[in-house]
């Protein structure tokens, strides 16, 4: 397993993005994505030579991160990428960890399975993919374009 990203809860994605861009020099890697199962909105930020950061905003009061955001937000989780989700979860459980959320489709990862575990006091997300939904691939006239927007534009031109 390797660390894929760090999850940070924020009250507002717009404010969080502005802080991470201005203060730490990160840029947006994706457009915001809504995770309906976790009731959050997320966006990935990147900086050359650094791990990506996933900002997490509660989408409604029923979100598991709502209370943390209400207190001002902060560190939420580390995410590890694995080659085999099932074997990794079994290994974590053998080592005393607990699966909190079993594998389910993660909208921020183009619906590839994600899981959440708790291990030695550390909330941890487990993924088995490199995919990030709504990834920004280009800038067109100063406006960011995502993979999905780019594909949609091509389909529109072909079938127009």
Image (cartoon, rainbow, N blue to C red):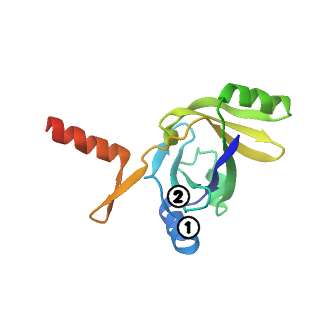
Give the quarter of the image for residue 70: bottom right
Left or right of residue 50, residue 43 in this image: left
Left or right of residue 115, residue 21 in this image: left
Residue lying farthest to the left in this orientation: 160
User: Earlier along the polypeptide chain: callout 1 or callout 2?
Assistant: 1
- The answer to whether any part of residue 3 appears in the image is yes
In the foreground, 60 or 93: 93
| Quadrant placement of the C terminus | top left
Q: Where 61 falls versus 71 (above or below)?
A: above
Which of the labelled discs sits on residue 20, or is there none?
Answer: 1
Give the quarter of the image for residue 104: top right
Which of the labelled discs sits on residue 132, or is there none?
Answer: none
Query: Label 1 to label 2, Cα distance in Å?
Result: 8 Å
How many numbered discs, if any?
Answer: 2
SS for dot 1 = helix
> Which residue is tagged 2?
45
Residue lying farthest to the bottom in this orientation: 23
SS for dot 2 = strand
Rendered location of residue 66, percent (x, y) = 61, 51
- Within-10-Å neighbours for mark 1: few <14, some 14–19, many 20+: some
Q: Where 40 falls versus 143 (above or below)?
A: above
**Residue for point 57% across, 60% down:** 11
**Residue for point 17% across, 42% down:** 157
- Within-10-Å neighbours for mark 2: few <14, some 14–19, many 20+: many
Callout 1 touching callout 2 (CB < 8 Å) = yes
Q: Where 68 falls versus 22 (above or below)?
A: above
Rendered location of residue 119, percent (x, y) = 80, 41
- The answer to whether any part of residue 59 appears in the image is no
| Quadrant placement of the N terminus | top right
Rendered location of residue 141, percent (x, y) = 26, 64
**Residue for point 66% across, 36% down:** 82
């Amino acid at each position: 397993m390797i660390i894929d990203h760090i999850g940070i809860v924020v009250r507002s994605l717009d404010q969080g993005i502005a802080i991470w861009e201005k203060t730490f020099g990160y840029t947006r890697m994706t457009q915001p994505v809504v995770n309906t199962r976790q009731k959050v909105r997320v966006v990935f930020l990147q900086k050359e030579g650094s791990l990506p950061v996933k900002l997490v905003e509660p989408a409604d009061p029923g979100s598991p991160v709502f209370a943390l955001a209400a207190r001002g937000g902060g560190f939420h989780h580390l995410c590890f990428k694995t080659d085999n989700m099932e074997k990794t979860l079994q290994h974590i459980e053998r080592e005393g960890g607990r699966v909190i959320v079993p594998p389910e489709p993660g909208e921020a990862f183009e619906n590839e399975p994600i899981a959440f575990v708790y291990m030695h006091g550390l909330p941890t997300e487990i993924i088995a993919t490199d995919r990030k939904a709504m990834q920004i691939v280009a800038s067109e006239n100063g406006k960011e374009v995502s993979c999905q927007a780019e594909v949609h534009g091509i389909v529109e031109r072909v079938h127009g």
